[in-house]
Amino acid sequence: MLDRLPPGAKVLIIRLRSLGDCVLTTPAIHILKQARPDLRLAVMVEDRFADVFRGNPDVNAVLTPHPAAAAIWSPKLTINFHGGTRSVWLTLASLAGKRAGFGHFAAQAAYNIRIPRAQEILGEERKVHTAEHMASAMFYLGAPRMEIPRARLFAPKTPGERPYAVIHALASAPEKAWPAERFLEIARSLKHLEPVFIGGPGDDLSPFAEFRTVRNTSLLDSMVLIQSANLFIGNDSGPAHMAAAFGVPLVVLFGESDPVIWAPWRATAQSLVANGPMRGIAVQQVERAIEALGVAA
């Protein structure tokens, strides 16, 4: 497919949300750009996640999810990585001659390129990581097989400050969150790094008020903060994938989600799995995981 696109052709990639999914789409985008550097790539994404793709040299445009924006971009190829009803309409609105989506997506009539299971493309019958899943689509479309790179994020560098550890103690659901009092134990145990607790809009960081807290900032500001950290500790979450993309050593705690599919990708990381309620992960396990990273915490 890629070989048949004319020089300088436009491609639209639809990845509406969420934070972790957006971050883990960037390796696939890089593979596509490596295969065809002449292509002009646009990513259509919800505004709250747009900073994941802004500043990325592989991406020529970041578009608001609107049918008119899809049509104005006028792509020769649209790749739907999202799969929901809204993304189907956006795919059709792009009027692209070639429309690609995974074979398990609903509304298969919207696509004239149906991407098979990642296992079929990779030739390995095993669980695949989310980054591998999306990268496999690029291999199917004709990109040469290569090692799937680390996720790519770009944010301004900040002047050096006191070494710090970013701690993300919250999660999208209570069952995914390690108890707050245990995060506090870990924060108090850090000798060489200032603990900085982060949260999003509406998050309650009052249990961590004895330490520096940062909440309700823009995604770009969060990226700036995370990329200069010496350590990241947190629940399985979008910020953990940002830390991995920036090469920050990290400890990630997993509850219900599968670390084979969602572990930090190509990162210096320790993944701890509860195998039941999150309380099943002991404070001592996290302390040992930090030591294993070799970080002077």
Image (cartoon, helix red, strand yellow):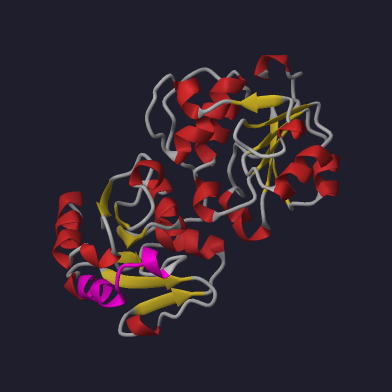
Q: Is residue 66 magenta?
A: no
User: In x, y percent, where is residue 51?
Assistant: 59, 55
Left or right? Give the position of 272 relative to 189: right
Question: Could you say which quadrant of the image residue 220 lies in?
Answer: bottom right
Left or right? Give the position of 44 relative to 23: right
Number of numbered callouts drawn: 0
Q: Is residue 34 in sight in this rendering?
A: no
| Quadrant for the N terminus in the image | top right
- For the record, the magenta segment spans 174-187
Q: Is residue 95 in sight in this rendering?
A: yes
What residue is drawn where x is 79% and y is 51%?
Answer: 66
| Quadrant for the C terminus in the image | bottom left
What residue is drawn where x is 50% and y is 21%?
Answer: 121
Left or right? Give the position of 135 relative to 228: right
Answer above or below: position of 122 versus 44.
above
What residue is drawn where x is 40% and y is 70%?
Answer: 174
